[in-house]
Image (spheres, helix red, strand yellow):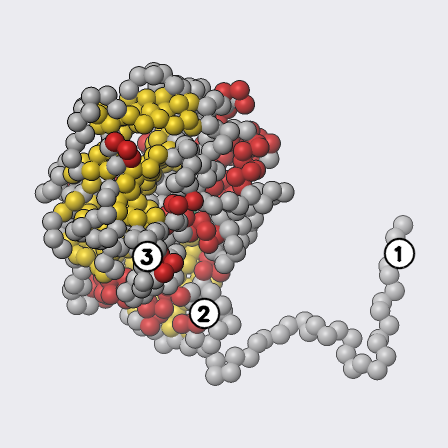
Amino acid sequence: MATAAPADPPPQGLVGTNDIPKTFEDVIPGGQDFVKRVVMIPMRDGVKLQTIIMLPKGAHDAPILLTRTPYNAEERAGNEKASTMLSALTHSDAVYVKAGYIRVYQDVRGKYGSEGRYVMMRPVRGPLNPTKVDHVTDAWDTIDWLVKHVPESNGNVGMIGSSYEGFTVAMALLDPHPALKAAVPESPVIDAYMGDDWFHYGAFRNMMLGYVHMQTVQQGPGVVTPSDTFDKYDEYLRAGSTGDYIRSRGLDKLPFVSRMMEHPAYDAFWQGQDLARLLAAHPSSVPTLWEQGLYDQEDMWGANHAWLALKAAGHASNNWLVLGPWSHSQVNGIGYTLGPLKWSGDTALEYNRDMVLPFLNQYLRGGATAKLAHVSVYNTGESHWDHFPDWPVACDKGCAVGLKPLYLGKDRSLSFTAPTEAQAGDSYVSDPARPVPFLPRPVLDPFFGYGSTYAGYLPWSKWLVTDQRFVDGRTDVLVYETPVLKSPVRVQGTPVADMHMITTGTDGDVIVKLIDVYPPQVPSDPTMGGYELPIALDIFRGRYRESFEHPAAIPANQPQRYRFELPNVNHVFQPGHRIMVQVQSTLFPLYDRNPQIFVPNIFNAKAEDYRPATVTVLRSGDQASAIGLPVVDGP
Ligand code: PG9
């Protein structure tokens, strides 16, 4: 039997016996100019959600700005020991704090201090969610509680948030509480299959697996999947298929990972979560400002497509769109630069101060009418904001201006003149054993140290503006280029990759990059000499060329058409520059490798399924491959 350890003898020569007092209250000289309340707000099913309310001292008739987050409300609400609310909260809150807003952060159910079960991107109630609660009801119940229990408020609530937090804003719009007077979904996840976090046009995004580990292994702070390999290119390649990677690390025991593996196609599981169609079917009258980065490496699809769907459903009047020159959620940081690109000012501040704040003031406080154009898109070629009554200016169908095909031509040329050759094409061998990297190696896990300045996040956050010279010498990357431009080429809208290709395999991916090639020397910025700057790029999984729901093998050695939209552009290719298009079949390890023969589920491809294929890009007659460019005249 254990006997109690003798008590420590009183230390000789010291006054106390314990240097750690039972309680201690920090004294903040001059006190604090804010009050922090931590409350547990009950939802309709009895589950309580931890909510942090930050109030300016002496606030009255103040509007509330609410963010619902899976990223730790306590942390998002900042440093409670700060003396001012401005220094307590994060950088992006500054303009709202200065304007006297009450700032509220809430943990979504099942994360951090909130009770209940966490479901990754919990779908709306219905076939995919048989419970009685979702983010729609949780937002409703939260807002209802806030307006009844925060006497300092004026009873008006706005919601704001980026990415997952933007998704919770968009969800709230499906049945908004009457006190929700304005919404700002920023890079919201709207359709995670088509172009947001998990897949792009059917290709799976390996790089998000570390995020799922970080978020779903435990309720509190998490880390990415343990690894003994620094270079993820190496690690994923050695693992085999992505399914092999997942199983060998036990990630298939994570329910959300196994759900993704069960749904590689755009079936009812993904369609039922497409918020663009849900919002269009249940449009709200809440004034909503949709924001998205033009170089968002995570959620490039959401805001733009939600806005388009609402516009198509006849609800353009209460929906605004802002597309800024930002990487993912950079709008919450500093926006002078993105990678090597330098803008004319702090574009993130311009957005928060000159667009969002007047918008919120108008609807939450009855302030002056915000002078906000229906669409604001940063011009990445001329470094200024452009304002439009509608968007896209030029597009495939339904725009004032159509697309202008830029044809892939002979001798790797690019031209607005259609090719005249009878039978022409360029071939390369795509070998899944030697996939084309998406970043110069080593490729680090982006979410290791997420949000910090850890080396892994930085290359990830700017990979979409990475100089493409690092791959343009590869034999499996086809490179087409215009002559040096004599006059500017202005593009405003949605480019379309319209590719005619043949493969010797029965499946395969198509990656198309639209690139601005800088002159060999740029005296004002020497490091930009010859830079190959991606303007828009994406991947398309060939088996989905006819239907995303019903994949079909590609008939080997027969021409096929692959037509897909690239992300939005508002750019000017300047005189002295060239336009370039690169075509390739792998973009690794961001995207899982396609075995290049058709297998029912690529997650389960076997080592022997991965085969080299000869891919031919056609460029003649009615099989002329081109990029439909949204070219417009004049500024
Ligand atoms: N892009 C992140 C994410 C959102 C939803 C699901 C998975 C990832 C985010 O920044 O929140």
Estimate the spatial distance between the alpha carbons at disc 1 and disc 3, rounded to whole Å: 80 Å
The spot of residue 59 in percent (x, y) is 34, 73
Q: Residue at x 77, y 79 (%)?
A: 16
- Asked whether residue 582 appears in the rendered view, the answer is yes
In the displayed orientation, state which residue is furthest to the left. Answer: 400
Q: Which residue is mark 1?
A: 3
Q: Which image quadrant for residue 372?
A: bottom left
Say whether disc 2 or disc 1 marks the residue closer to the N-terminus: 1
Quarter of the C terminus within the rendering: bottom left
How many residues crowd around disc 2 within 10 Å: few (fewer than 14), some, or many (20 or more)? many
How many residues crowd around disc 3 within 10 Å: few (fewer than 14), some, or many (20 or more)? few
Q: Secondary structure at mark 2?
A: helix
Q: Nearer the viewer, mark 1 or mark 3?
A: 3
Q: Which residue is mark 3?
A: 521
Q: As shown in the figure, which amino acid type bears the numbered disc 3?
A: Gln
Say whether disc 1 or disc 3 marks the residue closer to the N-terminus: 1
Q: As shown in the figure, which amino acid type bears the numbered disc 1?
A: Thr
